[in-house]
Image (spheres, coloured by chain):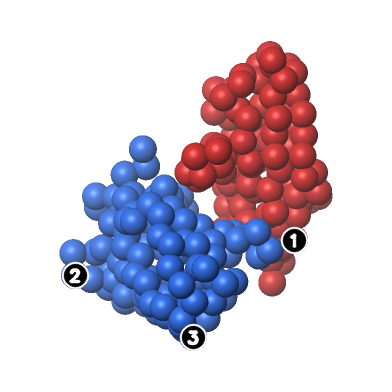
């Protein structure tokens, strides 16, 4: 079974600085997708970024980028120029891409990001 | 706004009761997923529907059931509620199961007293 691990329960960053959130996963599959979701105090789950395992190029979305290391099964999220609105829980998630009957998301336990003004 | 709607936003009920949570997927999305977020279990997949048919089951209790209607909205029924069922219940949708991105609704916060 696939698992997702986020080893940092909480991280803190100064406004305008850069922070990296870690995520590791375990799978025997070769075809899968990885995601970072943000959950602000409103509790809404917001997609931040996604990565297809077959793509070597790291995904980027504005100030958000990932460092995808397939061999190491690592998928970290880098937030540049941190803003107060980035403060939230961040969840790493895995989804099988194969011909599985379930395309459920498997989530890590989350990392709470605090942004200091 | 993801385009996925869930009602009600909040629900307070007593142990032993039954409640129904409702989800309307984004326009054009055929697949609906239900997730439970609790303090002790984190975010867990419950069940998935695609175009009215159950597609996959996760850690869903027998006291819980769901269905997807012809207009594609979905309902999650929780019965014989226990204190431990208190959680945030999310619905997510995607165009079809093979489209990898799931968009989440705002959730229904259930409190069982």
Chain B, hue in figure: blue
Q: Is residue A48 left or right of residue A30?
A: left
Observer-nearest of B104 and A30: B104
Task: Name above or below for residue A17 compared with residue B17.
Answer: above
Q: Quadrant of residue A8?
A: top right
Q: Tell me the distance, in whole angstroms, between the alpha carbons under discs 3 and 1.
A: 29 Å
User: At numbered mark 3, what does the secondary structure look like: helix, strand or loop?
Assistant: loop
Binning the other alpha carbons within 10 Å of mark 1 as few (below 14), some (14 to 19) or many (20 upward) gives: some
Q: Is residue B113 left or right of residue B68?
A: right
Give the chain letter at badge 1.
A
Which callout, 3 or 2, points at the residue further toward the start of the chain? 3
Q: Tell me the distance, in whole angstroms, between the alpha carbons under discs 3 and 2.
A: 24 Å
User: At numbered mark 2, what does the secondary structure look like: helix, strand or loop?
Assistant: loop
Picture coordinates of residue B57, whole percent (x, y): 49, 77
Q: Quadrant of the C terminus of chain A?
A: top right
Q: Which residue in the protein does label 2 denote?
A: B70
Q: Which residue in the protein does label 1 denote?
A: A26
Observer-nearest of B50 and A108: A108
Q: Quadrant of the N terminus of chain A?
A: bottom right
């Amino acid at each position: 079974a696939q698992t997702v691990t986020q080893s940092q329960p909480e991280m803190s960053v100064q406004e305008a600085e850069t922070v990296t959130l870690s995520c590791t996963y375990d799978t025997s599959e070769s075809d899968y997708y990885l995601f970072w979701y943000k959950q602000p105090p409103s509790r809404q789950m917001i997609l931040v970024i996604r990565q297809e395992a077959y793509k070597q190029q790291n995904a980027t979305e504005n100030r958000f980028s990932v460092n995808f290391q397939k061999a190491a099964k690592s998928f970290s999220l880098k937030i540049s120029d941190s803003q107060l609105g980035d403060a939230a829980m961040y969840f790493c998630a895995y989804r099988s891409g194969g011909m599985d009957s379930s395309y459920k998301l498997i989530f890590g336990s989350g990392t709470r990001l605090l942004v200091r003004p | 706004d993801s385009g996925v709607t869930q009602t009600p936003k909040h629900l307070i009920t007593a142990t032993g009761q039954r409640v129904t949570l409702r989800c309307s997927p984004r326009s054009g999305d055929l697949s609906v997923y239900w997730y439970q977020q609790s303090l002790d279990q984190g975010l867990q997949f419950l069940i998935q529907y695609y175009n009215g048919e159950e597609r996959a089951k996760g850690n869903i209790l027998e006291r819980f059931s769901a269905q997807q209607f012809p207009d594609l909205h979905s309902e999650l029924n929780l019965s014989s509620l226990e204190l431990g069922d208190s959680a945030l219940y999310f619905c997510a949708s995607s165009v079809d199961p093979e489209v990898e991105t799931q968009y989440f609704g705002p959730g229904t916060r259930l409190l069982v007293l």
